[in-house]
Image (cartoon, rainbow, N blue to C red):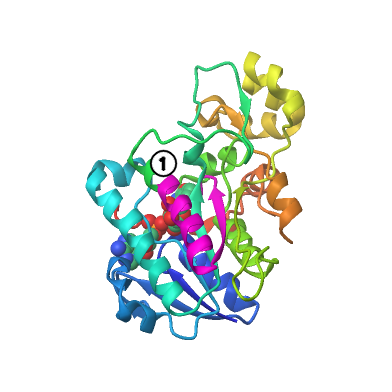
Amino acid sequence: VKVFITGSLGTLGSAVAAALSDRGHDTVGVDIRPPAEVTCDIRELSGPAGAAVFAGADAVVHLASLHGRDHMSRFGPDAFWDVNVEGTRAVYAAAAAAGVRRVVLAGSMAVYGPIPVKPLTSWRVVREQDPVTAYDSYSMTKLVCERLAQYHASRDGISTTVLRFGHFTPADVDHYGFRLLFGGVDVRDAATAVRAALCAPSGGDGDGSGAVVRALNIHALSPFTPRDLPALGADPVAALRGLRPAVLADLERSGIEAEPLLWGRALWPAEGALAALDWRPVWDFDRYAAARLAGDLSDYAGLAGPRWGVD
Ligand SMILES: NC(=O)c1ccc[n+]([C@@H]2O[C@H](COP(=O)([O-])OP(=O)(O)OC[C@H]3O[C@@H](n4cnc5c(N)ncnc54)[C@H](O)[C@@H]3O)[C@@H](O)[C@H]2O)c1
């Protein structure tokens, strides 16, 4: 299978290219920066040139985007619209012209509204069927991209899996480890979710009729369940201590304070993706804590990676 990946040099793009190559897929990276295999601005893909770029593609993984607070303060709303919406429109137009029937589109947890943060005490559980909202230039453009996917399903017979990812941006390892409890995901698990979405039945017919768009939340597996919401609302550190007393005590003894690291007051079960895809995330809080306590963080070297457009 020949897969084109936009944003191939970014945090997720590099992980997806590696995950697909591991399984023998043929990948072509498309990025605005060299050394991508195709160096181009996705906004220039509309028109005949775009179809030529995607010639021979069986699927497109569309990841290139401006995202997050860092990009927002740096680029502004016009750039967000331009890269995310015009760029996605051009990617779909090129995919349609090249006869592509399958796209995996990077969505975001941001479409469910602002991440609930402290001092909020009413924790919530977020699932795919929950209401979505556009509250800033990022969430708004991500929602428009999902609508564009629907448009191209009905117009061009392209089936899209939207993966609404949790947070995987490179970060301090302790921030990373604790965010896996409440809305984070390891980029390697995000990448295997992309691979699984490419391999899963698209839901549409091979000829493009009945093309569908489905959205799946992609998060790390957390030991907390909806039954823990009252305890989390009362005192999240105590709730964690209740589930992982020895681990938390050991982390505290090694100087790690849990409270400032408890990012996001919500649970994000990945059960929709677990049911729909042949995928199971393997990087979680327990694994981070074991490595942290053993003093071997070699598996987490990628967290020190650069952040495109920021560093
Ligand atoms: N980082 C997160 O935690 C997170 C969370 C949820 C969703 N997402 C989504 O996942 C996707 C990938 O995120 P990431 O963190 O890997 O991004 P990133 O910023 O690391 O990489 C983006 C890549 O896109 C390329 N790019 C930017 N504008 C381009 C253009 N006009 N034409 C061609 N290439 C362009 C950049 O050169 C870069 O290599 C994005 O769509 C993002 O919205 C990210």
Residue situated in front as seen by the camera: 306 or 14: 14
Mark 1 neighbour density, 10 Å: few (under 14) some (14–19) many (20 or more): many
- The residue lying at 27 percent from left, 55 percent from top is 82
Q: Is residue 251 within the magenta segment?
A: no
> Which residue is at a point 63% across and 59% down the rendered structure image?
193
Residue 213 against residue 247 in the figure, above or below: below
Q: Is residue 112 left or right of residue 282?
A: left
Establish if 26 lies above or below 145. Answer: below
- Residue 272 at what x, y percent from top left? 70, 47
Q: Quadrant of residue 192?
A: bottom right
Q: Position of residue 229 (x, y in %)?
A: 69, 22
Q: Quadrant of ligand 1?
A: bottom left
Looking at the picture, tell me which residue is in the foreground, 113 or 116: 113
Q: Residue at x 23, y 47 (%)?
A: 78
**For the residue marked with disc 1, what is the amino acid?**
Ser
Residue that numbered label 1 is attached to: 139
Question: Split into 4 quadrants, where in the image is the N terminus?
Answer: bottom right
Q: Nearer the viewer, residue 213 or 16?
A: 213
Task: Answer above or below: position of 199 versus 56.
Answer: above
Mark 1 within 8 Å of ligand 1, using the beta carbon: no
Residue 64 visible = yes
Query: From which residue to which does the magenta span run?
Result: 142-169
